[in-house]
Image (cartoon, rainbow, N blue to C red):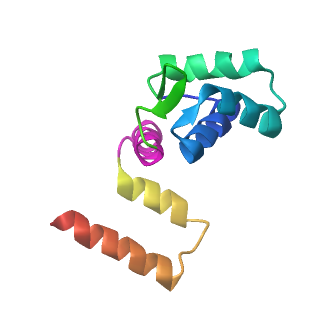
């Protein structure tokens, strides 16, 4: 699921405020992005067409949670960039950036919980 940076910021705005009336979304978009009403509705329609959100009788809600969206995006990145290999991703990630003891412990917890 590919969306651009501006669409991502707009999606974050919706996720942070949902359910949100379309009128309020227009006002928030004007304040945060300087958008006109037509721009807000154009970007919203694109995200609805991609299956992220729905606008039902003027109330905008998500069809995919923020967490689910980022999970899918992460899986897609690892699949496309590292052939689906999580070890290859971790090796590349840690080759230039060392992990702290806390990060290592958190990763171990994740691995241990995935075993069950």
**Residue 57 at x, y = what percent?**
49, 19
Which residue: 57% across, 74% down? 98
Which residue: 41% across, 36% down? 64
Does the magenta run of residues contain 7? no
Q: How many marks?
A: 0
Which residue: 71% across, 28% down? 26
Most distant residue in the bottom direction: 101
- Where's the C terminus, which quadrant? bottom left
| Dominant secondary structure of the residues highlighted in magenta in the image | helix
Quarter of image, res 44: top right
Most distant residue in the right direction: 34
Compared with 113, 26 (above or below) is above
User: In the displayed structure, does residue 9 sit left or right of residue 102?
Assistant: right
User: In the displayed structure, does residue 71 sit left or right of residue 92?
Assistant: left
- Front-most of 86 and 38? 38
**Residue 107 at x, y = what percent?**
39, 71
Quarter of image, res 23: top right
- Front-most of 49 and 58? 58
- From which residue to which does the magenta span run? 66-84
**Residue 16 at x, y = what percent?**
58, 47
């Amino acid at each position: 699921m590919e969306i651009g940076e501006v669409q991502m910021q707009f999606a974050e705005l919706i996720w942070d405020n949902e359910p949100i009336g379309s009128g309020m979304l227009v006002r928030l978009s004007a304040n945060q992005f300087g958008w006109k009403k037509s721009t807000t509705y154009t970007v919203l329609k694109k995200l609805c067409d991609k299956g992220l959100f729905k606008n039902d009788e003027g109330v905008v809600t998500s069809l995919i949670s923020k967490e689910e969206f980022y999970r899918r995006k992460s899986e897609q990145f690892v699949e496309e960039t590292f052939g689906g290999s999580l070890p290859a991703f971790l090796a590349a990630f840690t080759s230039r950036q060392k992990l702290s003891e806390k990060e290592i412990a958190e990763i171990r917890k994740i691995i241990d919980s995935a075993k069950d």
